[in-house]
Amino acid sequence: EDVAFVAIDMGYSDLKGLNAFAQEQGYPWTTGLGDQELLQAFRVKVQSTKIAIDMDGVIVYRAGFGKGTNEEWISVFEILARRSPRT
């Protein structure tokens, strides 16, 4: 199953620049810009925070800078894929 994935970046001031950077890096995912309200809403206090949210808006994974493993992140996507609506 497909899982929607959007990488949110706080370091760019415009989406065009962020998309250009993502394309240069070969990132295949959708990118988006966040703001201070987003940081506050999700209680992000450390750079490179990873948050996974299921289709009901429930946070199912959270890890800060240098935390978590590749295996954990893959597992999160597997869980989200099982929870996604079947089409």
Image (cartoon, helix red, strand yellow):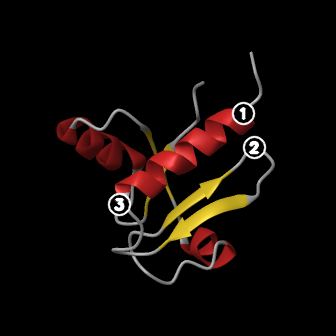
Q: Could you tell me which secondary element the residue under label 1 belongs to?
A: loop
Which residue is depicted at the point 37% across and 75% down?
Answer: 65
Pick the front one: 10 or 64: 64
Which residue is depicted at the point 52% across and 41% down?
Answer: 5
Which residue is depicted at the point 58% across and 36% down?
Answer: 4
Across and down, in percent, residue 26 comes to 23, 35
Across and down, in percent, residue 38 comes to 61, 68
Q: In the displayed structure, does residue 45 sit left or right of residue 26? A: right
Q: Is residue 79 above or below residue 61?
A: above
Q: Could you tell me which secondary element the residue under label 2 belongs to?
A: loop
Pick the front one: 26 or 36: 26
Q: In the displayed structure, does residue 61 sit left or right of residue 20? A: right
Query: In this figure, which residue is indicated by the disc labeled 1?
Result: 84
Task: Return the mark for residue 55.
Answer: 2
Pick the front one: 70 or 5: 70
Q: Earlier in the sequence, mark 1 or mark 3?
A: 3
Q: Residues within 10 Å of mark 2 (few under 14, many from 20)?
A: few
Residue flagged by tag 1: what amino acid is it? Ser
Decide: marks 2, 1 in contact (CB < 8 A)? yes
Q: Residues within 10 Å of mark 1 (few under 14, many from 20)?
A: some
Q: CA distance from mark 1 to mark 3?
A: 30 Å
Q: Could you tell me which secondary element the residue under label 3 belongs to?
A: loop
Q: Residues within 10 Å of mark 3 (few under 14, many from 20)?
A: some
Query: In this figure, which residue is indicated by the disc labeled 3?
Result: 12
Pick the front one: 46 or 75: 75
Q: Earlier in the sequence, mark 2 or mark 3?
A: 3
Across and down, in percent, residue 66 comes to 33, 74
Quadrant containing the C terminus is top right
Residue flagged by tag 2: what amino acid is it? Met
Decide: marks 1, 3 in contact (CB < 8 A)? no
Across and down, in percent, residue 84 comes to 72, 33
Q: In the displayed structure, does residue 31 sit left or right of residue 54? A: left
